[in-house]
Image: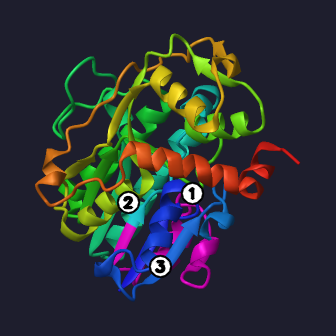
Amino acid sequence: MRVLVTGGAGFIGSHYVRTLVAGGYPALAGARVTVLDALTYAGNLANLEPADGGYDFVHGDICDAGLLAEVVPGHDLVVNFAAESHVDRSIDGPADFVRTNVLGTQTLMQACLDAAVPKVVQVSTDEVYGSIDEGSWREDAAVRPRSPYSAAKAGGDLIALAYAVTHGLPVSLTRCGNNYGPYQFPEKVIPLFVTNLIQGRKVPLYGDGGNVRDWIHVDDHCRGIQLVAERGEPGEIYHIAGTAELTNLQLTQRLLDEVGADWSMVERVPDRKGHDRRYSLDDSKLRAMGYAPATGFDEGIAATVRWYADNPSWWKHLKGVR
């Protein structure tokens, strides 16, 4: 069994690789693992140090068709984590998002088709649906992205699904809520807030803080992805929902409590352009296949905060801190 993980040096991809190499996915026991990553600012080989020796690394871009033609053949499973993923960056510079998330996905799907890969999983986000005031999205909901990031992810999703319909490529698609856990690049809200507070720096809270997100531990997300890799149907979408739906105000309070800080450390800043109000996924389809989250938010956020407190050498240079 050979597994190719694109974007495998990023936050979520590296967790999947570390778990796979450590034997956490019995169906992939003994698999040979290849990690392909462009090592842009959020890709970090330090994320893979616990898996040292358990994978082959290829430094490259999923937009490079020639490279993919060399790397993809012979793999039995391809899991695509490669993406530009930060909304704020997409507002300031959308071109990289369109290139990687749309063109890169198409280039990878074509390479998988050419190589007759038996199983492909495209990893995506709940943000493609836009914003929902109440209730939860099912997999048949229309995509209505509202940021350059989510629009680019939606474009890549549609490309992947088109390859399933048009060419019969055995690709399944997952969509998930907001992830948290160790090794997350400190531009995202939880590691940004935690590391700022550890440094004694204030944290920026957008707008009125009423935006609602569904939080899932990265390990639960990756276990959902693996279930889809094993049992997902071609051309199907699977939601992986979280364990805690919180406003940003509630999340901020939890992080302040964990670090032992108070609201004097919070700085209100103007809201993000086009800031989606609420996301929520219905994951009953995946749960019917046997999925259930294993990490409660209380347990997971406490362990995550401890990890950043215990590993300043990992994040300080990423923030330009000596």
The residue singled out by tag 1 in the image is 10
Is 313 inside the magenta-drawn segment?
Answer: no
For marks 2 and 3, give the CA distance.
Answer: 13 Å
Q: In which quadrant will I find the N terminus? A: bottom left
Query: Between 79 and 199, which is closer to the camera in this rendering?
Result: 199
Picture quadrant where residue 84 is located: top right
Query: Between 163 and 154, which is closer to the camera in this rendering?
Result: 154
The residue singled out by tag 3 in the image is 21
Q: Which residues are magenta?
A: 49-78
Residue lying at 61% horizontally and 11% vertically, measured from the top left: 270
Relative to 257, residue 218 above or below: below
Where residue 237 appears, as percent x and y from the top left, is 22, 49
Say which amino acid is labelled 3: Val
Query: Between 194 and 50, which is closer to the camera in this rendering?
Result: 194
Residue lying at 50% horizontally and 71% vertically, measured from the top left: 18
Frontmost of labels 1 and 2 is 2
Relative to 18, residue 158 above or below: above
Where residue 211 appears, as percent x and y from the top left, is 43, 20
163 lies left or right of 181: left
Most extreme residue toward the right is 322
